[in-house]
Amino acid sequence: MAGIVLAGLIGMVAGLRTMTAPAAIAWAAHLGWISLDGSWLAFLGYRSTAVILTLLALAEFVTDTLPATPSRTVPIQFAARIASGTLCGGAIGTGLGQPVAGALAGAAGAVIGTLGGARARARMAAAFGSDRPAAFTEDAVAVVAAILVTSAL
């Protein structure tokens, strides 16, 4: 049961930052914190996968602060976050022998993280008087949450 909660939580991270969750899962798999050996997700355990996903996550941190970046709730952005949450939750579930439950929890977490994150960021931006500090705060929350979830595996 705790593993399914972790799958939901990594989905919430994906809802905040699409690429942070898969980067964290890839590092967890590479470091042996989660076993994806023998599954179709084994590629997440390769060092090159972890490095590439980390670079993509860093790029997302930058692009997220640009004014032309669309809202996370537009269909393409929302779908990407759900796909990321599903993949990452499924990876956690696979490591625990419950891939479908993990994927579903990850998808649900991504929906919650996307919608809740958008509301929280709007409130923070209003409180700060600027979106940039809210974006940096959200980045930090996503990274810390991803580390806490993967270290609990």
Image (cartoon, grey):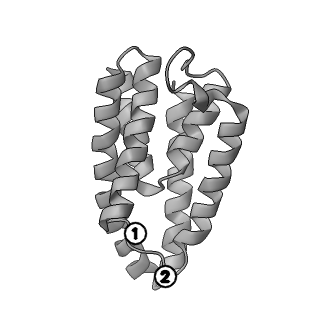
Amino acid type indicated by mark 2: Ala
Q: Residue drawn at (41%, 73%), measured in percent from left and top?
A: 124
Q: Would you place residue 106 above or below residue 130 in this image?
A: above
3D distance between C-alphas at marks 1 and 2: 17 Å
Q: Residue drawn at (34%, 55%), measured in percent from left and top?
A: 79
Q: Would you place residue 34 above or below residue 17 in this image?
A: above
Instruction: Point out the residue furthest to the front here.
Output: 40
Residue 25, x across and y down, in percent = 55, 35
Residue 5, x across and y down, in percent = 34, 30
Task: Work out whether residue 134 or residue 14 is closer to the camera in this orientation and state it.
Answer: 14
Q: Would you place residue 44 above or below residue 38 in this image?
A: below
The residue wearing badge 1 is: 121
The residue wearing badge 2 is: 68
| Tag of residue 21 | none
Residue 147 appears in the rendering: no
Amino acid type indicated by mark 1: Arg
Q: Residue drawn at (49%, 35%), measured in percent from left and top?
A: 149
Q: Would you place residue 31 above or below residue 113 in this image?
A: above
Q: Residue drawn at (31%, 66%), measured in percent from left and top?
A: 73
At label 2, counting other C-alpha atoms closer than 10 Å, the crowd grade (few under 14, some 14-19, many 20 or more) is: few
Residue 15, x across and y down, in percent = 39, 53
Name the secondary structure under disc 1. Answer: helix
